[in-house]
Image: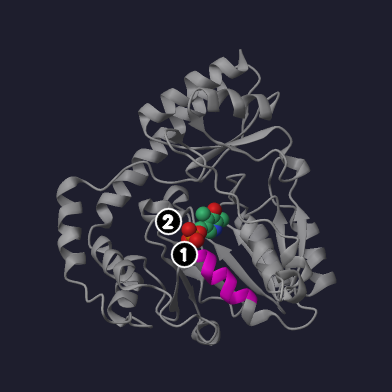
Amino acid sequence: MTRPQDILRPDVLAMTCYPVPNSTGLVKLDAMENPYRLPAKLAAELGERLADVALNRYPEPRPTALLEKIKFAMQVPAACEVLLGNGSDELISMMSTACAKPGAKVVAPVPGFVMYAMSAKFAQLEFIGVPLNADFTLDADALIAAIETHAPALVYLAYPNNPTGTLYDDADIERVIAAASKSLVVIDEAYQPFAQQSWLPRAADFDNVVVMRTMSKLGLAGIRLGYLAGKASWTTEFDKVRPPYNVNVLTQAAADFMLDHLDVLDAQAAELRTERTHLEDAIKALPGATVFPSAGNFLLVRVPDAAVVFETLLTSRVLVKNVSKMHPLLANCVRLTVGSAEENAQMIAALKLALH
Ligand SMILES: *Cc1c(COP(=O)(O)O)cnc(C)c1O
């Protein structure tokens, strides 16, 4: 009898699954989801649209009309092509797979988005994390030194970064791109709706840059749609390792519909930006809490004891993310997703108890 231990990679056997805590009955402020549903009338219209979808057919692998709509709506430069992923997580996985030559490496600032390192590990690429400065700004000199030492295939820059919320300096990013002349720099703009700053208009200005976006943080986390904009020389190659039919027909139809109603999602993002300011001000007024500036729909907060804060919030039925063990720079930090006004009020009330 064959056991998994007999045939699987030892590093896979040693892994644990990506943890997703049970959130039943909790105010869910741990995963940067948009708290708002679609307006009822729009949801009903979407339902009708989805009812028309031919579920018996495989999805179009390169849905021309949807791609054109994305390019137009997101003002993707004319010199760029767009590649779709089942969430941007899948795009990261495709890039890792395509670059997985023996000895190939990935460099990214840490603490950063965990999927860069995980995806590298899955594809057996070496991941090199370069610590941010203590205030979570980019240590551009250290990053450039790492790029020069390791000549990585991929360099990830989350703009803004998760879990810190930092928008790196444009001049620093320019220096990194120039130093990474033998690498591909992936600028991850998952939080662009909350940052309102973007490298997408410049995506075609460099031969070694692609820009990644997602519909997830904009309010459509459930449909799983990410996209990569870059020169065709890159997207054509990554397309070769895309699992066929990776973006299902319901996702394609929902995205196509919602791109005609981006005003609704944009208005929700604007509300969340206002809520972010309110939340930041409220937390600043609490004893012992330090809030870091964030361009995302979340705030990174340092507290005297992150474990106590996490548990006290949970007792008040508020679920946040304790990131304090993710990296030494994040000691005693929790990450709070910006929710609706009511959810944020509940979180603040619980935080007050915790910091009392
Ligand atoms: C949430 C997030 C993503 C998102 O991924 P999807 O798979 O598109 O949901 C990508 N990058 C960063 C930095 C994120 O925080």
Q: Which residue is mark 2?
A: 216
Q: Is residue 239 above or below residue 198?
A: below
Find residue 249 and report its image quarter.
Answer: bottom left
Q: Position of residue 325 (x, y in %)?
A: 73, 41
Q: How is the image coloured?
A: one colour
Q: Residues within 10 Å of mark 2 (few under 14, many from 20)?
A: many
User: Relative to 128, is 295 on the left or the right?
Assistant: left
Q: Position of residue 90 (x, y in %)?
A: 52, 69
Circle number at residue 236: none
Q: Position of residue 288 (x, y in %)?
A: 66, 20
Report the magenta residues as a range: 87-96
Secondary-structure class at tag 1? loop
Q: Which residue is mark 1?
A: 87
Q: Position of residue 83 (x, y in %)?
A: 45, 77
Q: Is residue 344 above or below residue 66?
A: above
* Sequence-first tag of 2 and 1: 1
User: Relative to 303, is 220 on the left or the right?
Assistant: left
Magenta stretch containing residue 179, yes or no? Answer: no
* Closer to us: 36 or 18: 18
What secondary structure do most residues of the magenta stretch adopt?
Answer: helix
Q: Are marks 2 and 1 in contact (CB under 8 Å)?
A: yes
Write the residue at 31% across / 51% down.
265
Secondary-structure class at tag 2? helix
Check disc 1 and give the amino acid type.
Gly
* Closer to us: 297 or 349: 349
Write the residue at 39% across / 39% down.
272
Which image quarter holds the C terminus? top right
Check disc 2 and give the amino acid type.
Ser
- The number of numbered discs placed on residues in the rendered structure image is 2
- Residue at mark 1: C-beta within 8 A of ligand 1: yes
- Residue at mark 2: C-beta within 8 A of ligand 1: yes
Q: Is residue 134 visible?
A: no
